[in-house]
Image (spheres, rainbow, N blue to C red):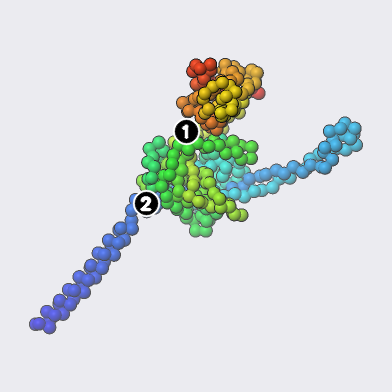
Amino acid sequence: MKMKHFFVIILYLIISSSSLQKAISDDVSSSRKNALTTAIKKVSPAIVGINVTEMKQVVYRSPFDDMMIDPFFKQFFNSKPRVENYEVKGLGTGFIISKDGYILTNHHVAGNATKVVVSMTDGRQLEAKIIGSDATSDVALLKLEGESDLPYLKLGDSDDLMIGEWAIAFGNPFGLFDVNSKPTVTVGVISNSGVNFIHQENNITRVYRNMIQTDAAISSGNSGGPLVNSNGEVIGMNTVIFSTSQGTLGAGSIGIGYSIPINRVKQIVDLIKEHKEIQRDFDTGINVRELDENLAKYLGIKKTRGVVVFSISRNSPGDVSGLEPGDIILEAEGVKIYREEDLLVVIKDGFTDQTIRMIIQRDDKSVEISLKLKNLKRKK
């Protein structure tokens, strides 16, 4: 009996040890699961890689073109510039926002594409149609035709952000999505919000307004991908990186990336769906200069921060509004104006026929001005 009891005890200890090990293993496994891993698993199926084809033109001119200005030489030479078209390939990221196949990405990724191929996480490659895009806000809306039950992301509220909260960036850096049909995930925090700046690219003025800054790594190819919170809700579209690291494949992250707030993207998408194209072909006719100590002294004023109207074209929107040279622009559409870029962000982000309300200082008085953004070339 004693020997039997001994074996029973040994067996019990073995079973208990096995159960304990399993319990520890289960506990460790469950501890690895958190809000981030849950959000990543939830979001990943709706991320897509984007491959685009654009047609570019190169104009080759004759070395004798400068001579053609002279009428004497024109009678001997009939030089015409030679135009050649060539294809340019590009890539980026997008994310599905509806079960019937609407996709968001950046304008600089797909806005000028002649062909867009979308790589899905199930391995399929589908051609997408460009519904519309806006170069200024850098937003493009694509559509996969014939789809009805796709995974899609919930758009959150970018006005409800906390500095320091988790931020998860999904993307296709350097085309890695095509390697295994999976997005690359990086994690950081919301570093800042409400950042405004302007970027000039190929004669296009892009207005980045109220941008979300994050230290989640964003590299070339991540453009157009979503920035999501720990609930898996989209709070921004990854768009711009500041980088000192530049290679033949593009720029790498140094921890300073910017996303377009999703509330701004929603507004642009609504306009694209309604109008297909957002009209921004206007001119104000005003030239401004930033105030500094020397200019303030010349104008005889104490204020050294702001923007002063330097000149106004006759019969331009600025002239019609009642603006005068020497006026100091203090506010535009509720935005305080401290430097020239503050004013440009508001005006360049406007729409044709929109009225911009300004508060100016004139002769030590505050005056409200309404500036209508008109296209003077368009027939009335």
Q: Which part of the image, by quadrant, shows the N terminus?
A: bottom left
The crowd level at tag 1 (other Cα within 10 Å; few <14, some 14-19, many 20+) is: few
Q: Is residue 361 above or below residue 92?
A: above
Question: Which amino acid type corresponds to the residue marked 1 in the rendered image?
Answer: Gln
Between 251 and 245, the residue placed more toward the observer is: 245
Residue 81: % across, % down? 79, 40
Q: Is residue 220 above or below residue 376?
A: below
Mark 2 Cα-neighbour bin, 10 Å: few <14, some 14–19, many ≥20: some
Q: Residue at x 18, y 76 (%)?
A: 11
Nearer to me, 162 or 287: 287
Q: Residue at x 89, y 35 (%)?
A: 73
Q: How many marks?
A: 2
Q: Residue at x 23, y 68 (%)?
A: 19
The image's mark for residue 36 is 2
Q: Quadrant of the C terminus?
A: top right
In the rendered view, would you say 152 is above or below 31?
A: above
The vertical placement of 248 against 317, above or below, is below
Task: Tell me the element at label 2.
Answer: helix
- CA separation in Å, label 2 and label 1: 28 Å
- SS category of the residue bearing label 1: helix
Is residue 50 something that shows in the picture? no
Would residue 198 be found to the left or right of residue 85 on screen?
left
Nearer-N-terminus badge (2/1): 2
Q: Quick check: can you spot residue 359?
A: yes
Where does residue 17 sit, x and y in percent of width and height?
A: 22, 71
Q: Is residue 1 left or right of residue 315?
A: left
Q: Is residue 371 left or right of residue 157?
A: right
Q: Residue furthest left?
A: 1
**Residue at mark 1:** 267
